[in-house]
């Protein structure tokens, strides 16, 4: 199937989401649920959360990549923050920093979607269902919200895991921030590393050396993306600048990962993390405290399941 044919099928699946209008769609799906404020230990309204997010320099909204409900939550945050601050830009895990000219051309309306989709090579660059991301991309395209590519080619992260410091060729080391190898673990990331190693240890035969290599590769992702978040503040001379980061939840959980790396470079930047969780019913406050969800982010947004082409099985 050609890129154009693939786009045609994706367009047919996603156009209903776009035509429904994001606000109407979110309301119809009962997204106006209470949000758990992890620092306050209480539920707040979605509007209260949005007002709090509007005061931060960097806002992370996590996702499970194939969950449409998470993408709709991200879209709601995008709309709310951009309405409050036209200086908002976005940083996306889904794109490489080398793709910035294509991202700028699309967000500033210089290239139509079908041509951009072909040029960005979505299936190779990211590969998860496009229909989940399309409403956010089209909002950026129609409202000239700049998107920054935060990531690097997968070969870089694979090289960190399999080759190590001494064997990494210059063509891959080029993508790593200076001093990366001395910052595999930063102070304050012990909880994050423990969570990652527990989550990643799915192979009974995995050795400690293999696990350390996997954590180094995760750190490479976080370092590269954090470095590129900071670059936005370094190159855009706007005192009202905010960066909304669209990223897998595992890169910002416990307010660590990318947030830790951004704070290492620019400790004065305020950061907030939203972790969407898809549930049929909102849990009680006592259940949340028992399950330790107060640690997952600044806000846990319990969103309802959304059926569709991009939803998990």
Image: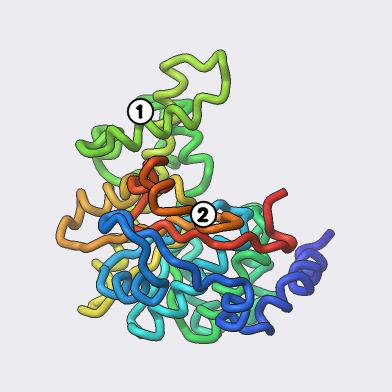
Label 1 CA crowd tier, 10 Å (few <14, some 14–19, many 20+): few
Checking the image for residue 270, the label placed there is none
Q: Earlier in the sequence, mark 1 or mark 2?
A: 1
Secondary structure state at the residue bearing disc 2: strand
Q: Find residue 144 and report its horizontal and vertical position in percent.
A: 47, 84
209 or 292: nearer the viewer: 292
Q: How many marks?
A: 2
User: Who's the residue at 25% across and 73% down the image?
Assistant: 55
On screen, 176 above or below 118? above
Secondary structure state at the residue bearing disc 1: helix
User: Who's the residue at 40% across and 33% down the image?
Assistant: 195
Q: Find residue 141 and report its horizontal and vertical position in percent.
A: 54, 81
Q: Quadrant of the N terminus?
A: bottom right
Q: Which residue is mark 1?
A: 165
Q: Find residue 273 and report its horizontal and vertical position in percent.
A: 35, 58
Q: Which residue is mark 2?
A: 277
Kindly indicate the quadrant of the structure image that contains residue 10.
bottom right
């Amino acid at each position: 199937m050609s890129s154009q044919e693939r786009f045609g099928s994706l367009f047919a699946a996603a156009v209903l989401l776009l035509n429904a209008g994001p606000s109407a769609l979110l309301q119809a799906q009962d997204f106006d649920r209470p949000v758990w404020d992890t620092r306050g230990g209480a539920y707040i309204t979605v509007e209260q959360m949005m007002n709090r997010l509007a005061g931060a320099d960097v806002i992370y909204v996590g996702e499970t990549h194939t969950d449409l409900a998470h993408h709709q939550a991200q879209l709601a945050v995008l709309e709310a923050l951009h309405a409050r601050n036209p200086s908002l830009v976005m940083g996306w895990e889904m794109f490489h920093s080398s793709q910035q000219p294509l991202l700028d051309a699309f967000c500033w309306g210089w290239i139509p979607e079908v041509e951009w989709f072909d040029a960005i090579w979505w299936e190779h660059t990211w590969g998860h269902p496009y229909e989940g991301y399309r409403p956010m991309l089209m909002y950026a395209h129609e409202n000239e919200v700049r998107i920054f590519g935060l990531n690097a080619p997968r070969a870089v992260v694979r090289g960190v895991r399999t080759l190590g410091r001494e064997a990494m060729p210059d063509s891959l080391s080029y993508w790593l921030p200076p001093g990366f190898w001395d910052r595999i673990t930063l102070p304050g990331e012990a909880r994050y590393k423990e969570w990652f190693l527990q989550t990643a240890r799915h192979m009974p035969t995995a050795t400690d050396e293999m696990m350390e290599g996997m954590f180094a590769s995760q750190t490479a992702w976080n370092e590269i993306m954090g470095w590129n978040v900071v670059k936005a503040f370094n190159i855009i001379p706007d005192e009202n600048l905010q960066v909304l980061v669209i990223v897998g939840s595992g890169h910002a959980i416990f307010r660590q990962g990318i947030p830790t790396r951004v704070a290492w470079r620019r400790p004065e930047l305020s950061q907030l993390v939203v972790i969407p969780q898809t549930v049929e019913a909102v849990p009680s406050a006592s259940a949340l405290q028992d399950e330790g969800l107060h640690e997952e982010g600044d806000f846990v947004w319990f969103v309802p399941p959304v059926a569709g082409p991009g939803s998990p099985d």
